[in-house]
Image (cartoon, rainbow, N blue to C red):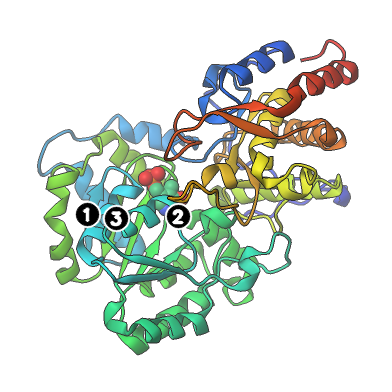
């Protein structure tokens, strides 16, 4: 990672090691329009039209900026159903980076999970993991399997100084395997840049310890590498023993611990698509038949050749410390600025995005009135910024109609890689600070239309209790005058 000095030490900011050559115009709709839009969207940020959004921080999936080299490679893609040289280039790049012989393409990350679960998970089998991801858990439970989450205790602490909150608790892992008997374990899964607990990494040492446990009991180790880029950056910058290793060496050392790794290329490699890298011929053969059935022929797996070319170049660019440091550095900057202003956030900063702790931000709103959902709606009103609720709204009701409360109430503000500038990040920080000052004006939400499943994701609509959004808008006009 390039180390650039600043003359005035106290003003150090992350510095972009790229320049912008294609831009997309943004508009910040005026307050009255934002109010109408969020009402029209039923206070559900998923239902906002992107044209009405100023900073879209909903997700990092499929919206990372591509490089000029990726765009150029897309123009020379070799389109053929079988034997495409585009596929040959991609498979060779993956072999070169991860050192695994075999590759199966799939249309995105969850498709890899579908194939893995179908082949390795049976009713009653168990998949121990550091933490689940939504689609992972769904595919495992659909096959009748059970997920056991064994992340270290610090992983679930909102504020912490632990640099590797995504680490697996290896003692609990060994206990878990013994409790179920090794024969019941489908595989052990480690998720790089653990998504749902704030993009938190595990260390290379922890991965090696997990491998040791797997070897002791003869079980397979699978890595979800979708958020590997962030995890690589954190290993390089936070793990003393890896300080002098190159990103390429760290990557290989991680892959060497695993039997299989899979990824969503909507994140890893800043493209689209996904795939599974496999060490053993037997595992490859066990999964191969499902690719033509569910994805597409073995040389494209549901992806376009252009996506595959962009992925090949994007994977190589992931080996560049300057490239992968941009996201985590910007997120780290945003988290630091919010902490300075007293706004409650998850610490330490992870990858993927900045996570606002709604439980502390709007501590006057009971969980049954969806504090994180309300805060996400309020932030759109305050600045046209779209985040994602990660709390009780994202949970399902129990079969008896009762509502399990989430263990954390977060608003995730994703920072798609190389998309936003530092001034846009500062704008978001400024509006969050204003909102925090007036947090008592924010009230709860209640359902007006509640879907039975995936209620936030689908077309669930809510209303603000006591009409708080109008009061918040009134305060905005008072403080910001006629500014947008
Ligand atoms: C996004 C993601 C997935 C799923 O990938 P898609 O391409 O969205 O299907 C799986 N695992 C993790 C850790 C992810 O972040």
CB-based contact (under 8 Å), mark 2 and mark 3: no
- Residue 400: image x %, image y %? 46, 50
Q: Residue furthest front?
A: 400
Q: Which mark is residue 104?
A: 1
Image quarter for residue 343? top right
Q: How many dots with numbers?
A: 3
- Residue 168: image x %, image y %? 52, 73
Query: What residue appears at the point 36 percent right and 53 percent down from the top-left corner?
Result: 138
CB-based contact (under 8 Å), mark 2 and mark 1: no
Q: Is residue 93 visible?
A: no
Q: CA distance from mark 2 to mark 1?
A: 21 Å
Q: Is residue 178 visible?
A: yes
Query: What residue appears at the point 86 percent right and 44 percent down from the top-left corner?
Result: 341
| Front one among 476 and 467 | 467
Label 1, secondary structure: give it: strand
Q: CA distance from mark 2 to mark 3?
A: 14 Å
Labels 1, 3: front one: 3
CB-based contact (under 8 Å), mark 1 and mark 3: no
Choose the circle earlier in sequence order: 2 or 3: 2
Choose the circle earlier in sequence order: 2 or 1: 1
Q: Is residue 189 above or below residue 31?
A: below
Report the residue marked by disc 2: 133
Q: CA distance from mark 1 to mark 3?
A: 22 Å
Q: Which mark is residue 142?
A: 3
Q: Quick check: is the Cβ at mark 2 less than 8 Å away from ligand 1?
A: yes
Image quarter hosting the N terminus: bottom right
- Residue 377: image x %, image y %? 66, 30
Label 2, secondary structure: give it: loop
Q: Is residue 220 above or below residue 66?
A: below
The local crowd at label 3, few if under 14, some if 14 to 19, many if 20 or more residues have their Cα within 10 Å, is some
């Amino acid at each position: 990672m390039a180390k650039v000095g600043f003359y005035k030490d106290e003003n150090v900011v992350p510095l972009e090691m790229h320049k912008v050559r294609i831009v997309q115009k943004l508009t910040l709709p005026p307050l009255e329009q934002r109010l109408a839009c969020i009402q029209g969207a039923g206070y559900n940020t998923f239902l906002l039209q992107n044209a009405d959004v100023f900073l879209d921080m909903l997700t990092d999936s499929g919206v990372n900026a591509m490089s000029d080299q990726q765009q150029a490679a897309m123009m020379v893609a070799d389109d053929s159903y079988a034997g495409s040289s585009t596929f040959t280039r991609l498979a060779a790049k993956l072999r070169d980076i991860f050192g695994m012989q075999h590759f199966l393409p799939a249309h995105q990350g969850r498709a890899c999970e579908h194939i893995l679960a179908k082949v390795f998970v049976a009713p009653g089998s168990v998949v121990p993991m550091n933490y689940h991801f939504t689609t992972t858990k769904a595919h495992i439970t659909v096959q009748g399997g059970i997920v056991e989450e064994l992340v270290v205790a610090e992983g679930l602490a909102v504020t912490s100084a632990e640099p590797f909150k995504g680490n697996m608790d290896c003692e609990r892992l060994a206990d878990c395997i013994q409790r179920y008997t090794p024969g019941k374990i489908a595989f052990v899964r480690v998720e790089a840049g653990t998504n749902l607990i704030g993009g938190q990494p595990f260390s290379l040492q922890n991965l090696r310890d997990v491998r040791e446990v797997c070897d002791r009991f003869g079980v397979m180790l699978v890595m979800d590498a979708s958020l590997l880029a962030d995890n690589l950056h954190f290993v390089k910058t936070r793990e003393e023993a890896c300080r002098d290793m190159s990103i390429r060496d760290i990557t290989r050392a991680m892959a060497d611990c695993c039997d299989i790794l899979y990824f969503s290329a909507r994140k890893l490699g800043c493209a689209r698509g996904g795939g599974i890298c496999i060490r053993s011929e037997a595992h490859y053969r066990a999964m191969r038949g499902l690719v033509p059935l569910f994805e597409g022929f073995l040389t494209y797996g549901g992806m376009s050749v252009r996506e595959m070319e962009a992925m090949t170049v994007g994977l190589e660019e992931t080996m560049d410390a300057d490239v992968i440091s941009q996201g985590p550095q910007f997120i780290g900057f945003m988290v630091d600025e919010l902490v300075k202003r007293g706004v409650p956030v998850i610490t330490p900063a992870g990858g993927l995005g900045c996570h606002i702790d709604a439980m502390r931000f709007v501590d006057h709103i009971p969980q049954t009135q969806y504090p994180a959902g309300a805060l996400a709606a309020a932030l759109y009103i305050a600045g046209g910024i779209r985040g994602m609720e990660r709390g009780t709204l994202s949970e399902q009701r129990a079969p008896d109609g009762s509502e399990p409360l989430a263990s954390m109430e977060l608003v995730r503000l994703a920072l798609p890689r190389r998309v936003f500038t530092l001034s846009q990040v500062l704008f978001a920080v400024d509006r969050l600070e204003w909102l925090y000052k007036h947090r008592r004006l924010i009230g709860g939400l209640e359902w007006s239309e509640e879907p039975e499943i995936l209620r936030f994701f689908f077309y669930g609509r809510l209303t603000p209790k006591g009409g708080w959004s109008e009061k918040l808008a009134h305060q905005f006009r008072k403080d910001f005058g006629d500014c947008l």
